[in-house]
Each structure stands twice: as C-alpha cells, then as structure tokens.
Image (spheres, rainbow, N blue to C red):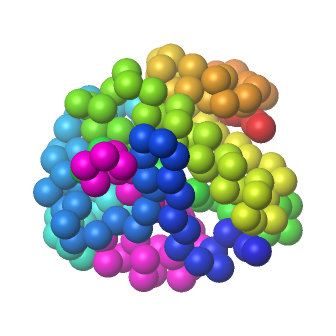
Amino acid sequence: MKLFDEIPYMESDRIILRRIEDKDSDDLRNMTLNPNVYRYLPTFLFEMQCEDVHKTIADFYGELFASKDSLILGICMKSTGRFCGIAEFYGYKESLQKTCIGYRLDEPWWGKGIASETVGLMIDYLYSATDTEIITASTMIENKASARVLEKNGFIMTAAAVPEDWGYSEPTIADKWFR
C-alpha cells in the first residue's frame, strides 16, 4: 500500500492517531495560537495558513491529502479522546519509498512521553502498512526535546546544523535525521 491510499487510524495503550474532526477545532486553534509550540517549527505549516480552523480541518483531507503534500492526523488521548497535537507525514517520495515525519504537541502535553509514543506509532505504520523504506525528520538545533524523541525511536542524525528554508527571513539551521 502507498502512503496516500487511505487516511489511517492507529492506536497504542495511551494514544490514538486519527483523522482530525470538527470537534477538535477549539483544541487545534488553541495549539496554533501558542507561540511556545511553534517556536521550533516552520512558519509555513498548513494549520497556520487559515484563520478558519474548520476550513483548515476540511483542507487537511481535501487539497492537502489529494495533492499528496501532507497527511495530518490528530494525536488524541485514548482514555478521554482529547486532542493534544498533530502527527504529520510529508515529503513523500514514491520513487524513493521515502517519507518525512513531523509532530507537534500542545504545551500541556509536553514531557509525558506522548511524542515518543506518537513517533513509534508512525514508524510502525510506515514500515508495516506502506511501502516506505526510508523515514526522515528535521529538527532545529535548539530543539533538544525533539532530538531526544527521535533518538529514542532509533533515528540517527545524518547532518548537523545545515541551513534549510523553513519560511523565515533567514535560513533555519537544522539537524537532519534518518531511520
């Protein structure tokens, strides 16, 4: 199966990765308004481009999915269903069987192991349910927490402190990761 053949659903003991729904709109809006969440992330992230969060949610599974630019899932707590962040598959290169991953959690959910568990689910899904053979990620060099999440999930830094265009006026210095 190819990455964009379906919108997947994944779960572990504590979290669920699923399609984001309108019922998640308030939590998604609150997350996107939190500057602490986005200080280590590109400015051009899709959820930041439109003020109408309901349109954004619809576009996640419309134009963004159809164009195979990005597959975005909500990270939700299994016990309550509460939305706590985003898991993203992007940079899909079918000919290379390569996919990039990203994730962001709203601040109240930091430090609870949710990001590590999310990345684990994403890896399991990509390797077991799709034709992906290479998984990559990028982190700003200042984002030590995200680097630890990747290391815990078997990623190896392949390039340190390289300039990338993350939509800021100057290139962002980022580390590149491979699994």
Q: Position of residue 8 (x, y in %)?
A: 55, 68
Was residue 168 drawn as part of the magenta stretch in this picture?
no
Q: Position of residue 135 (x, y in %)?
A: 73, 47
Instruction: Specify whether residue 124 is in view.
Output: yes
In the visual, does 155 lie left or right of 35? right
Residue in the picture at 37% in, 21% down:
111
Give the number of marks: 0
Residue in the picture at 54% in, 82% down:
66
Q: In the rendered image, which quarter contains the N terminus?
A: bottom right
Q: In the rendered image, which quarter contains the C terminus?
A: top right
Instruction: Specify whether residue 172 is in view.
Output: no
Q: Quadrant of residue 84?
A: top left
Location of residue 110 with respect to 75 vertically, above or below: above
In the visual, does 120 lie left or right of 178? left
Depth order, front residue of 147/160: 147
In the visual, does 138 lie left or right of 15? right
Residue in the picture at 66% in, 30% down:
153
In the visual, does 65 lie left or right of 30? right
Was residue 77 drawn as part of the magenta stretch in this picture?
yes
Residue in the picture at 77% in, 54% down:
127
Which span of residues is magenta-colored? 57-81
